[in-house]
Amino acid sequence: MFTQSQFLAAQQLLKKLYEVCCEPVLQNYGLTRMELDVLMILAEENGIEAAGEMVAQMGFTKSHVSKAVEQLVRRGWVQAIRDDQDRRRQRLRLTKAAQSAVEEGRLAQKKLMRFLYHGMDEQEKRQVDSYLVRAAKNAQSALELYEGGKKHGAV
């Protein structure tokens, strides 16, 4: 079983590797890490369309997401469209101007995954994916319990 120090070391190594893989994209396009993260999330087909959803689902801070979205809108890479159902919400859409940066971002993500899965066969890759998804769901559930208990004075 992973010790706490092994977990912390792995977390830092993964973060550093992600940064190394993304650095050329950041430099080529003059992006911050948060701006690239927002672009890549919007490029995925997982239904995250509004800044509030990114904050809730990805654990980003509202101020960082807002600043990144504002800068991407200013650059013409993201379009913010008012939601007809709820005027307080904005739907975020990538523009064609962002396509090149998104493609380079995808290549950086693929590079990261090649490093992480090096030496693993397809079954091992699927197992790792399955374990990570389950661990993330467990972490989400634990945080929801913790936050709920904190609000009600139980923690």
Image (cartoon, rainbow, N blue to C red):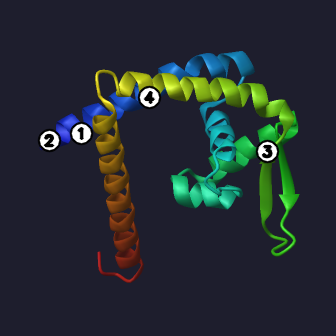
Q: Residue at x 65, y 57 (%)?
A: 47
Q: Name the mark on residue 113.
A: 4
- Element under label 4? helix
Disc 4 crowd rating (10 Å Cα; few below 14, some 14-19, many 20+) is some
Q: Outermost residue, bottom direction?
A: 152
Q: Name the residue under label 1.
A: 7
- Residues under labels 3 and 4: Cα distance? 30 Å
- The image quarter in which residue 30 lies: top right
Residue type at numbered disc 4: Met
The residue singled out by tag 3 in the image is: 70
- The disc at residue 3 is 2
Q: Which amino acid does label 2 sit on?
A: Thr
Q: How far apart are marks 2 and 3 (CA)?
A: 41 Å
Q: Is residue 115 left or right of residue 85?
A: left
Image marks 1 and 2: residues in contact by CB distance under 8 Å: yes
Q: Nearer the viewer, mark 4 or mark 2?
A: 4
Q: Which amino acid is tagged 3? A: Glu
x and y, in percent, of residue 136 in the image: 37, 54
